[in-house]
Image: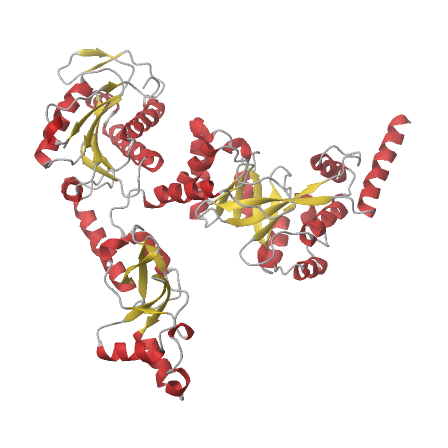
Amino acid sequence: MKRDEEHAFAREQFLQLLRHKQIHTVYQPIVSLKDGIIAGYEALTRVPEDSGFESPVRLFEYAEKEGLIYPLDRLARETAIRNSLAMGGRELLFINIPAASLQDPQFAAGKTIELLRDRGLKPEHVVFEITERSSIHDFAAAKQVLEHYRSQGYRIAIDDAGAGYSSLQAIAELHPDFIKVDRSLVQDIHLHKTKEYMMETFVAFAGKLHIEVIAEGIECEEELLFLTRMGVHYGQGYLLGKPGTEKADVAPGLIQQIVQQRKLHDYAGSAWAIEDLTTPIQKFDRKTLISEVANYFKKNGQAAGAAVVSDEVPVGLIMRERLFQQLAGQYGFSLFWNRTIDQVMDDGPLIVDEHMPVETVSQLATSRDTNLYDLVLITSDGRLAGAASIRSILEYITNARMETAKVASPLTGLPGNLQIHRELNKRLQENKRFSAIYADLDYFKWFNDRYGFQKGDQLIQYTADVIQQAIVVCGRPFDFVGHIGGDDFIALTSTDMPEKLCVEVIRRFDEGVRMFYEDEDWSYVEDRSGNRVATSGVTLSLSLLVCENASPVTLEEISQASARLKKRSKSQSGSVYVSARIGLPAKEDGEPVGSAYPNSSSS
């Protein structure tokens, strides 16, 4: 009897909460990990302290158990929209939808559209989050419902991905626009290799399906920077903004770090920057008369276009042919001749930083509805530096790929010796400090003889991946990785902390190399002379040569210094790196001093 009374009391409390609409909504920002801008807000339901339900989770669990999930979900959705912080524009409103609500005949009905209009929103501003913890029993029916609302413009997210067993099935069946990765995979991701690998899988998987990834529960800078470098699209968590009822602001320091770390991801391994294709372009202030611009094109028949600037910052593009087409129309001269150029310019040209990789610019250009002969405007520190045509960019990439294919390693796809020498010469000519890291596997011949050439090739490919991944995490934009041949590699980096990069390479290598041993316990190997050497497996020797470039350095000097370092590194047991400096000022001439460092666990 007492249990019946408790049940009746709880039901009355629940119904009263619905009747009086006692729930309210707070909003947590979702931040772009490309530029630090707030991309949207997730609506989170909150209940009064005296409601009898200790948390929103308990409230929804009770509603689903009692068969009352539909009215509660509709109230939560209406409250979220009515008080939304997203007021149109680019910001999105993320609304949680229990899986059971997909069967609600009134789900997202006409009333929702009316509420959106009242707040200046459209269906394309709304993302329905389907929580993965609420199992979807009938994917075919759920997919049919979601496709109906997707056709109206709504977008779909799978929430809590990674928290349960059916994540991949939900993603595969429902084809969402976003995957929200559960905080259990995000927390301390920089410290757990398994979490890192799982997140890499989500990012790679999502990229192939054109899905964007949102990492939930970011609470420290290390997590944020690590996720940004991995290429995760968006972040959410207390570090970026707590749930509230007012618009949020991301700390300027965090925005700056996000932008810097994103460049590391976007530019890592890129050999060519768009600045290599930059050519001068005529510029006009936005208030210049159209007649002056037209006369310039008449006098300069080879000029395809001109940039429009405001205080040296590009704001538009005017292409020769389009301008003359407008002037050639009926009343063209009388209508436009004495107007300013900003009234007819293309105010949405492609504008890129000079350090952006050529391939990235090509992808941006070809994804736009533009003419092959249009110009891309290039900036340096935000100011106009020049331009490049889309056609020249595509031709450059085609030629570069053909050249790379001729000399690249067929096993790893990395640049070979010809490109390595070119890259070294280029860095020496720039007279800037850089570091060369030579990597060599220890006891690779023993491994290859014992397991066969197929396993040997896999180990070489693994080593190439390790070096490239470490460059993304600890390197700089336009760092270079090459395959000298066999089990020898080289990395050229401009980072101020090359030692940290070496430690990261060793850490990644040592943590993963044992998967190649098929659970065998090695006690020794044989060197090339057939002598037994006590070791637990294949190790990695790194030779770190810091080229200060304060005095002239030649390729031969780099080669000789690296050979000495290699001999020292391979004389020690375990995965190690040794370092030295060359190109020091004349007063510091003499044999470079280097130090040996054991593996990352004790360095």
Q: How many marks?
A: 0
- Give the colour scheme of this rendering: secondary structure
Q: Is residue 204 visible?
A: no
Residue 180 lies, in percent from the top left, at 54, 42
The correct choice, above or below, for 495 with respect to 426 in the image is above
With 57 as the anchor, is 231 left or right in this view? left
Residue 587 lies, in percent from the top left, at 11, 28
Question: In the image shown, does 431 or 502 lie closer to the viewer?
Answer: 431
Quadrant where the N terminus sits is top right
Question: In the image shown, does 147 or 237 lie closer to the viewer?
Answer: 237
Question: In the image shown, does 581 or 95 lie closer to the viewer?
Answer: 581
Residue 34 lies, in percent from the top left, at 43, 47
Residue 522 sits in quarter: top left
Residue 123 sits in quarter: bottom right
The correct choice, above or below, for 36 with respect to 539 in the image is below
The correct choice, above or below, for 13 with respect to 84 in the image is above
Question: In the image shown, does 87 or 285 lie closer to the viewer?
Answer: 285
Residue 184 sits in quarter: top right
Q: Is residue 555 visible?
A: yes
Quadrant where the C terminus sits is top left
With 179 as the anchor, is 194 left or right in this view? left
Residue 367 lies, in percent from the top left, at 39, 60
